[in-house]
Structures are given as structure tokens and as C-alpha cells.
Image (spheres, grey):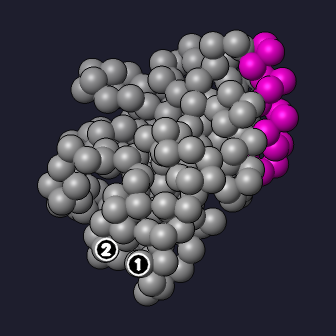
Amino acid sequence: MAVLRAPSADRYGPVVDGLVAGGVREIELTLTTPGTLDAVSHLRADVGDVARIGVGMVTDGVLARAALDAGAQFLVTPGVVRGAAELAREHGVPVIMGALTPTEVMTATASGADLVKIFPASAVGAEYLGQLRGLFPDLRAVPSVGFGAAEARAWLAAGAAADSMGGPLIGDALNGGSLRTLTDRMRRLAEEIGEDVIT
């Protein structure tokens, strides 16, 4: 899953096109980017059924509703947000809820998270997920923040359902960098960690 944090939402379009061309099928737009909610429906129309557009940094029920009304196909929260899970369930949309400690993992799962975002993943490393899965063998985890291709492979080997990557994947594409380089980087990542893990 590619995570986009841009100076403004008008930077999204070409980068989303480059990501989709490179094989990415799940794209998270963050609410820290001005204009994100206005961009969701346009981007969904552009990518069609090839990729899903979700909204991240959903911190309460009000933002969850706004994201769903805008057309978000999944929600991502930085921590446990019960209201987001309830609304997502009503709309038939999955929610990826942030957690780090065993208590937070239990709370996120009990609150209706479809997947649990291990955040910040770089603070604990892939070995940590192996330990968590010893406690929670059915945990569907998505590590997020602060790792590149080598670590992505390690997280998947430890049992991650998917990887969530921002800066190391996107590079400078949201600030005018080469979109061709972005697409090439995505294709190389797919080759390095296996195309089946970019979903």
C-alpha cells in the first residue's frame, strides 16, 4: 500500500498514475494533505477498478464520515478509533487501525479493525511482528512508516498481510520528481519482494 503525503492534493494525480502503472493496487491519501477529500472521487474515476483509493489519518468519527462521503474505499487510522470502524462497517468499507502494543492490538481488533497497522513500524522491526503473532496468530498486520524494500521483505516473512510504505517508495515524486523513476522503483520493488505482495 502506497501512502501519499503531499504539499497539496493537486499533486496526487500524476503520482497515482505512476503508482498504478508500477503495480500498486492500494493507495492511501492522508488527511494531512490539504484538499484530500475533494480529490478522492476524481482519483477513483481515474483509476477505475484497477486500484483502490483510501483515506488515512482518520482520527475520529467525523473525519471517518467525511472520508466515506467523499468515496474512500478504505480508512486508515493512526490509533484506535472506534467510531471509524462502526461507520466503515455500515458502508461495507474496511478499516486499518493503528496499534503498537499488545493492548492496543487487542483494542483495535475488539473495536472492529479489519487489519491492524503496526505503527511506527521502524521503532520495533519485523522481529516484533513475529512476537506479536505468537500471542495473536490470526493477526492481520500492516507495518507502516520508516522502512525500505529490504525491511518490507522481512515484514512479509514475519507474517505481515501487506506493507504500507510512504517516503522510501514515493521519493520526490510529489515534489516534482520523475514519475518514470517512481514507476521503475515500484516495478523493482515488486520484483524484489514478489508481485503478489503489492495488492
Residue 42 percent location from the top left of the image: 17, 60
Looking at the image, can residue 41 be seen? no
Q: How far, Cα to Cα, is label 2 from label 1?
A: 7 Å
Residue 28 percent location from the top left of the image: 42, 52
Q: Seen in the image, is 95 located left or right of residue 92?
A: right
Residue 94 percent location from the top left of the image: 38, 29
- Asked which secondary structure carries label 2, the reply is helix
Which one is nearer the viewer's eye here, 179 or 33?
179
Rendered residue at 63%/13% (across/down): 138
Which one is nearer the viewer's eye here, 10 or 165?
165
Amino acid of disc 2: Pro
Mark 2 lies on residue: 14
Which numbered disc, 2 or 1, marks the residue closer to the eye?
1
| Mark 2–mark 1 CB contact (< 8 Å) | yes
For label 1, the crowd category at 10 Å Cα-Cα, with few meaning under 14, some 14 to 19 and many 20 or more, is: many
Amino acid of disc 1: Leu
